[in-house]
Amino acid sequence: MDEMLREVYRQKCFEKKRTKFIALDFLTHWLYKSNQKRKGQQYTDFFQIPFVADWLKDHPRPPIPLSLLLKDEEAALIIQSFWRGYRVRRDPEVQELRQWQKDLRESIHIHEKVDEFWSKQETKVIV
């Protein structure tokens, strides 16, 4: 239990509502590696334990949400970059530039669109 409590404190489980720590996984792995029959054997990752691998083949887990995988600093960086990008895109000059680019893209491909339209119209008449 001491080892599990250290892991719980290391992953800050008491500070957050949700964490990626799964106590049953920890206990399973701890009991497996503490088994007297396995003394002297090399370390086995939790997902490489034979009965765990068999169980997960039949009962796959949903992916862990990104919010649980990211550290607080990484999450803050993503939020800040999104906010900065939003504020830049909201700027009227940038809006004008984006609209100009959209109009330019449409005007470049207008001949292709007209040809495509008339080819469809011709196939309707022939049939």
Image (cartoon, helix red, strand yellow):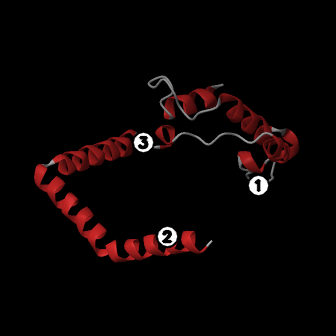
Could you say where residue 91 lies in the image, as x and y percent from the top left?
14, 49
| Pair 2/1: label in front | 2
Q: Amino acid at mark 3?
A: Lys
Q: Nearer the viewer, residue 7 or 120?
A: 120
In contact (CB < 8 Å): disc 3 and disc 1? no
Q: Is residue 84 left or right of residue 55?
A: left
Say if 113 sits above or below 21 in the image: below
Residue that carries the numbered disc 1 in the rendered image: 42
Residue that carries the numbered disc 3 in the rendered image: 71
Q: Is residue 59 left or right of residue 69?
A: right
Secondary structure under tag 3 reads loop
The residue at 74%/42% (across/down) is: 60
Say if 91 sits above or below 36 in the image: below
Q: Amino acid at mark 2?
A: Gln
Secondary structure under tag 2 reads helix
The residue at 22%/59% (across/down) is: 98
In the rendered image, which quarter is residue 114 located in?
bottom left
Q: Residues within 10 Å of mark 1 (few under 14, many from 20)?
A: few
Residue 121 bears which disc, if any?
2
In contact (CB < 8 Å): disc 3 and disc 2? no
